[in-house]
Amino acid sequence: NAGVTQTPKFQVLKTGQSMTLQCAQDMNHNSMYWYRQDPGMGLRLIYYSASEGTTDKGEVPNGYNVSRLNKREFSLRLESAAPSQTSVYFCASSGWQRPYEQYFGPGTRLTVT
Amino acid sequence: GENVEQHPSTLSVQEGDSAVIKCTYSDSASNYFPWYKQELGKRPQLIIDIRSNVGEKKDQRIAVTLNKTAKHFSLHITETQPEDSAVYFCAASSAGGGADGLTFGKGTHLIIQP
């Protein structure tokens, strides 16, 4: 099992450009999450999908959209990137047996200039 | 919403000594408290967790204690080793029941001095 995978690993965008971060899991988990990590700020929840077909806002959703494409895939879209969105983005997933236990992907390091 | 405070932000201990990291939370309905370890450039990895119906849990050199009345929980690492050097994050579940994400503390950079 690959666990949680994310693409790309690194990305540089100019202000105003758009892009989609991809996340997939092969653990048959129901719930998926997007977090951002900034120095000294810990991890903050952007959006989550408790189950296929549902998505909800987390602590810092402004400037982002998400799509739960199917049970395996959960994408994060930046429609018009801003320098404040420079961050490391982590996707995570959890299963119904242990819904709190989250497994993280390797992260995407995004720089917006 | 939930708010998690974590202290200290940096902790330096001699190899072989113990390390203690403390967290407080605000939402009395939170009932799950995990600890993650993150090495430089890597993903966070779950090292231990505790539920609100348990006061203490131990796994080899690491242990977590929970005081629900005071709304605080702590990570204890004994006999520290160089490979324990990392950033440690505490977290608490949202009141919604687990599938709606975690609220993290801001992290503690643990440095093990040889």
Image (cartoon, coloured by chain):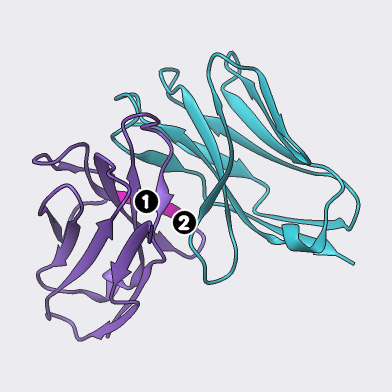
Q: Amino acid at mark 1?
A: Arg
Please report the bounds of the magenta region as a residue range.
A41-45
Determine crowd level at label 1: few under 14, some 14-19, many 20+ residues with C-alpha closer than 10 A: many
Picture residue at 24% right of the left edge, 39% below the top: A30
Q: Is residue A10 magenta?
A: no
- Answer left or right for B49 relative to A21: right
The picture places residue B89, in percent across and down from the top left corner, at: 56, 48
Chain under numbered label 2: A
Find disc 1 in the rendering and name its residue.
A44
Marks 1,2: beta carbons within 8 A:
yes
For the residues marked 1 and 2, what is the alpha-carbon distance in whole angstroms? Answer: 8 Å
Asked if residue B21 is positioned above or below residue A20 in the image, the reply reads above
Element under disc 1: strand
Asked if residue B64 is positioned above or below residue B88 in the image, the reply reads above
- Answer left or right for B56 relative to A12: right
The picture places residue B70, in percent across and down from the top left corner, at: 61, 18
- Answer left or right for B62 relative to A19: right
Quadrant, the N terminus of chain A: bottom left
State the purple chain: A
